[in-house]
Image (spheres, rainbow, N blue to C red):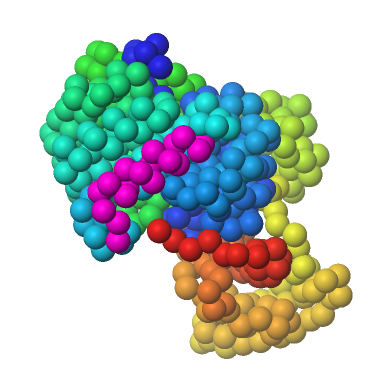
Amino acid sequence: MNDDKDWVRIFDTTLRDGEQSPGCTMNVDEKLVVARQLEALGVDVIEAGFAAASPGDFESVRAVARAVKGPVVLSLARTREADIERALAAVDGADKPGVHVFIATSDLHLEHKLGMSRQEVIDAAVWAVQRCRRDVDYVEFSAEDASRSDIEYLIRVFGEVIGAGAVVCNVPDTTGYAVPAQIRELFRTLRARTPGGDRVVWSTHCHNDLGLAVANSLAAVEGGARQVECTINGIGERAGNTAMEEVVMALDTRRDHFGVTSRLSTKHIYPASKTLSKVVGVSIAPTKPVVGANAFSHEAGIHQDGVLKNVLTYEIMRPESVGRLSNSLVLGKHSGRHAFADRLLDLGIDLTHIDVNDAFAKFKVLADKKKEIYDEDLFAIVAEEHEVDQRFELRNVEVESTLNGGPQAVVTLAVGGVESRRSAGGDGMVDACFRAIKELAGIDPTLESYQVKGITGGTDAIGDVSCFIRVGDIGVRGHGAHTDVVMASALAFVDALNRLENRRARSISDDARTAAPVVGP
Ligand code: KIV
Ligand code: ZN
């Protein structure tokens, strides 16, 4: 592991910690789409999930382990036999399999969550690492809540797991409580004082509760960490995890300061960010560094003047370096299939995993309606390719409204291939549509959120609608894109209903297959 000293490994946990973000759960196919983006980026490690959490999680880890070549593929596991066996079985077949075991080390967690003594935690951690090492060489150990743990105890824990065979020691700031100077010092101390500390890669894993996850991760690198755990767009529980694009570009842009950088192919950052955003239906704030819509636009006249004279006046990195191509006219209705496919390739979209003919047909329909097709439109078209099984299919929507109210919608929906039509009124055209769809589908979910976004400028822009619906414990999102926002809304609602049906079917089969459910630590 000593040869890892002059580069920073990127450990992506979008598919595990990121997926714990409300509304960001992904099915197997969606996880594969994201995993392929991670492979194109060249991340070093993919944490594909927590195999013991459910049969669905197990299947996702297994699918990613088999699909991806290059990165190490890990499953998370607690220090329990059942967890470790599930993790090992799920990553079996990976090019580079591994297991990530964790247990909490702060007194707070020991007393209130685990009910274990310090020695019991050490015994469990050592046993778990040794058990994993019987089957795989790559074992990472995480001391959950490390940043709030007693440093002397932490040194003992890490020393013991290194002796047991851990190759990566991860030091999480689980609650996002730490500040950069403290993290930097923590890594310096751990590296200097842990027995065997020079034989392992030290890793940082920060949460963003105080908005410090990226700063803390960079401070960890200054303190000697050589692995950063992060997620695309910083998704994750509560305020999220370290944003991969920010930490990677900070290391890359300020290599003069850090003296190390990652080995990522940064031109895949933007496609990965857009793909994730489409897959989970969570939009990116315009001011978000690196990937936000405004991250490279210059509004103030004085800035524009400077940039025109020399881009370096106000730009510290080039948009192209993160895969942002100029968002000008790229294709039009006369563009052929070849130009279309070339553009998708330029955007980092892997053509082997989409139906190019179908996507091209959708592009032609859109190009007929819109004069200008932007990259954003292409991402929307391609995201539609990763559809779920469709029990409900929207066949037609007719709407009518006047200035004085009384909106009416007539919807034609096929349910399991059988078409019917229903009209309904509502508080607006979208509400009327949703009411008609609910009656036709025979499902009455709660609509928890509804968002409309114009993907590109202009009144002929594609409207991108995301909604989140819930029935009981199951909450799902749906999205739809169309030049007409009412149609986009109806498509999003039907998409959500299809996802709901799939989730219900999956949880029935998960329940049937789970003989003994796993309980939390
Ligand atoms: O935040 C955390 O402590 C974790 C561990 C499981 C690594 O996600
Ligand atoms: Zn975490």
Question: Residue 256 occupies which quadrant of the picture?
Answer: top left
Q: Nearer the viewer, residue 396 or 273?
A: 273
Q: Residue at x 49, y 68 (%)?
A: 450
Q: Position of residue 410 (x, y in %)?
A: 72, 80
Q: Is residue 198 magenta?
A: no
Residue 230 appearing in the image: no
Q: Residue at x 57, y 64 (%)?
A: 517
Locate residue 447 relative to residue 369 in the image: left or right: left
Q: Residue at x 70, y 83 (%)?
A: 442
Locate residue 129 relative to residue 117 in the image: left or right: right
Which quarter of the rendered picture does the N terminus lie within? Answer: top left
Q: Position of residue 365 (x, y in %)?
A: 74, 48
Count of picture labels: 0
In the displayed structure, 174 sits above or below 181; it is: below
Q: Is residue 122 magenta?
A: yes
Q: Position of residue 293 (x, y in %)?
A: 41, 41
In magenta, the rendered stretch is: 115-132
Q: Residue at x 58, y 46 (%)?
A: 85
Q: Position of residue 418 (x, y in %)?
A: 86, 75
Which quarter of the rendered picture does the C terminus lie within? Answer: bottom left
Q: Nearer the viewer, residue 116 or 344?
A: 116
Q: Residue furthest right?
A: 418
Residue 188 appearing in the image: yes
Locate residue 119 relative to residue 394 in the image: left or right: left
What is the chief secondary structure element of the magenta stretch?
Answer: helix
